[in-house]
Image: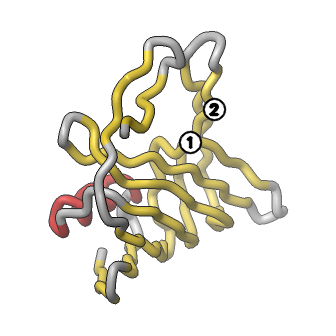
Amino acid sequence: MEYRKFGDTYIVRIDRDEEILTQLKVFAEAEGVKLASITGLGAVKDFTVGVFDPGAKVYQSNRFQGVYEIVSLVGTINTMDDAFYCHVHMCAADQQGRAFGGHLNEAVISATCELTVTCLPGRTDRAFSDEVGLNLISF
């Protein structure tokens, strides 16, 4: 991974065989990023995304392996209990153009991933909601 800062925005390149969420954590902790918006694209070879079932309060995950293009990656960086926390959704398409997506659990890069991380002033934390079953933004 390499990155550069331009004003309040970072351009982050994640390289082949690196995992997106792992690298985001390394980056955010190194740079002291506590609140940011993330967008990205690239190519992955192994990824797991989930869909939250609000009735059962659990994620149902799906793993995909092969040749995929990230058509959309969006999310946030903030904190939970004063530690790094990120919430990312990703959609990737296969060679036939079929797209698969959801809450990102893991994604290993096949070629490259280009992220734009826009830092925001201030801070939000996360707190678990028993009612919803998720870690919600806490202002």
Left or right, 122 with respect to 52, comes to: left
Left or right, 124 with respect to 114, comes to: left
Quadrant location, the N terminus: bottom left
Residue drawn at x 38%, y 48% as measured from the top left: 86
Label drawn at residue 51: 2
Q: Where is residue 65 drawn, in percent x and y?
A: 59, 50
Left or right, 35 with respect to 58, comes to: left
> In the rendered image, which residue does mark 1 sit on?
103
Left or right, 62 with respect to 13, comes to: right
Q: Amino acid at mark 2?
A: Val
The answer to which of marks 1 and 2 sits earlier in the sequence is 2
Residue drawn at x 47%, y 25% as measured from the top left: 134
Q: Where is residue 33 drawn, in percent x and y?
A: 25, 63
Residue 103: name its quadrant. Answer: top right
How far, Cα to Cα, is label 1 from label 2? 6 Å
Q: Are marks 1 and 2 in contact (CB under 8 Å)?
A: yes
